[in-house]
Structure formats: structure tokens, C-alpha cells
Image (cartoon, grey):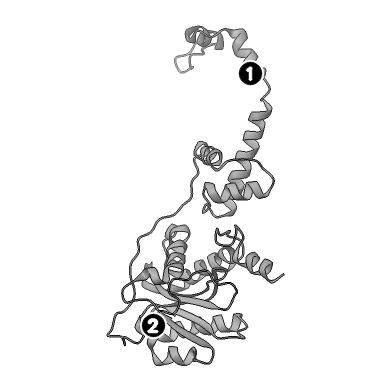
Amino acid sequence: MQASEERKISVNSVLKLLGVSSSGYYSWLKRSPSNQEIRKQKLKAEITEIYNESHQIYGAPKITSILQSRGHVIAEKTVGNYMREEGIKAIWVSPYIRTTIDPDFDKKLRNILSRDFNPKAPNTVWVTDITYIHTLSGFVYLTSVMDLFSRKIIGWQVSESLSAEHVIKAIEKAKANRKISNPVIIHSDRGCQFVSKSYLEATPAAHFIHSYSSKGNPWDNACIESFHALIKREWLNRYVIKNARHAHGLIFEYIEAFYNTIRIHEHCGMKSPYDFEKASAS
């Protein structure tokens, strides 16, 4: 035997060292998997498929809901255990940083919404806010408009400044996407963009009822704040974003191709905002 040739060890020698009988070992090799094991492997494959289709966003609660809607009888704890065995988990986390500019506001600004986040119909309450997004070229800003009924994002705009004109563009997109027949409550924080003359002109009193959060209280606008945290921790924080154009493409993919149309929400009875509105209209 040449020196370079590897030494060969027989299976029987290893089994003897381990104290395992050769008959038991070969019997184990030929054993067919049980029905329970087959079901487990099929469920793991389906869990992984759902997980990947959600862009690795869904955790055990949402995956369990989808499996149950498909007829599977399975507990959330079991789904969580299978996910751990497969080494998969929901990808998310991000800090909250405030972007509101805080000038000296008129004390007459009122909180009409008063944290009533569950309107009974679409186009009764809209909420809006601005959040920052870090890119290699500096900060860019996302203005979003949400219909509280379905949590659907009905207008959004990416910009390189906090100018009010970009807020107006998001509002105009929301107006173009919705048919307003009655006055809509539109709620925001007290940022200077939302009390500007151009904002008030874009949301005239004939069609909108202005509502404002208490000074320095993000909880008064919790739903849109939550959405902005969500898009970062589920999606944007995965990427090194180059510039505003790159950010726009990523945000479009998340909002239009996933959040509004596919992503299930507890508020919507585990439906997407699109499906929830469609079901409510039928």
C-alpha cells in the first residue's frame, strides 16, 4: 500500500467500536419512514415554501395561520419547533428615530382621531407620516398614507428632503387611488409639513377633517409608525441601499408587490389589505 493511499476502515469495525450490532444497523438502513415522519417532512417543506414566499418575513404565527387555512391541523408551537429544526426564523428588527420637525404650533390643533384605529369602512380615516431611510448617498425620506380600515398604503413618495411638496405628492397619489364621497379624517403628527399652507390646500376642509397627534406623542399615530418600523425591519434593513432610486425600487417591491396584496395582517383577519377590502365590499 502506498503512503499516499488513505487507510480504509470497514463499517463492521466502526459498529464494533460503537457497540452496535451489524444486523441492527442494516435493519435501520432498510427501515421505511413512518407516516408521522413523512407528514413531518412534508410540513417542513411547506413551512419553508411559505417562509420563502414571504421573503423570510413570516414567523410561526402567520405560517400557522396559512397552514390551517389550507386544512392542516397544527399548533403554532409545532410550527415554531419545525422552523427551529430547519434553522429559519423571521427576519426583522430596527430602532425608532423621530423625524418630526418641532416648531411652535398653534394650540388649536386637535386630535380628532383620539386613537380610534378601527374605522368601520374604507375612506373614513387616513393617517400619514414621514420616516427616514439611510442610504450610502445620505438620508432619503418616505412619506406614506394609510387607510386605517384595511391598513392599506394608498399613497407614498420617496424624496431626498423633508420639503412639504413631497408630502403633497403622496397625498395626491392617495386621492387619485381612492374615490372620496364623504369627508375623510386625515391624521398626522405636528410636523411643519402637515401644518403648511400647501398641505392644507391639498387637503381642503370640504373633503378632509384634520387631526393631529399630541405634541411629542408617536402613540397617537401608532399604525403608520408601526408600518414604517415594519418595512424597515422586514425588508429595507436587509440591503445596503445606494441612493434614492435604489430605495424607491425596494419600497415599490415591498408595498405594491407584497404588503398591500399578499402580506396577511392580524387586523384584517389574516387577509392582505387588498383581500380584506375586496371581502368587505362583497
Q: Measuring from the top left, give residue 31's x and y in whole percent.
A: 67, 19
Q: CA distance from mark 1 to mark 2?
A: 73 Å
Q: For residue 220, say whether it is visible.
A: yes
Can the viewer see residue 132? no
- Residue beneath the point at 50% across and 81% down: 185
Q: Which disc is residue 271 wearing?
A: none
- Which image quadrant for residue 194? bottom left
Is there a contact, CB below 8 Å, between mark 1 and mark 2? no
Front residue of 194/172: it is: 194
- N-term mark: 1 or 2: 1
As drawn, 2 above or below 188: above
* Front: mark 1 or 2: 2
- Asked if residue 78 is positioned above or below residue 3 in the image, the reply reads below
Q: Residue at x 33, y 70 (%)?
A: 98
Task: Name the quadrant of the C terminus.
Answer: bottom right
What residue occupies the far left of the structure in this picture? 104
The amino acid pointed to by label 2 is Arg
Per the image, label 1 sits on a secondary structure element best described as helix
The circle drawn on residue 29 is 1
Query: Local crowd at mark 1 within 10 Å, few (<14), some, or many (≥20)?
Result: few
Residue at point 42%, 59% (across, down) = 237
Q: Nearer the viewer, residue 78 or 28?
A: 78
> As drawn, is 27 to the left or to the right of 185?
right
User: Where in the figure is residue 270, as x and y percent of width and height?
Assistant: 60, 57
Q: Would you say 181 lies left or right of 187 here? A: right
The image shows residue 120 at horizontal and vertical percentages of 58, 72
Label number found at residue 110: 2
Element class at badge 2: loop
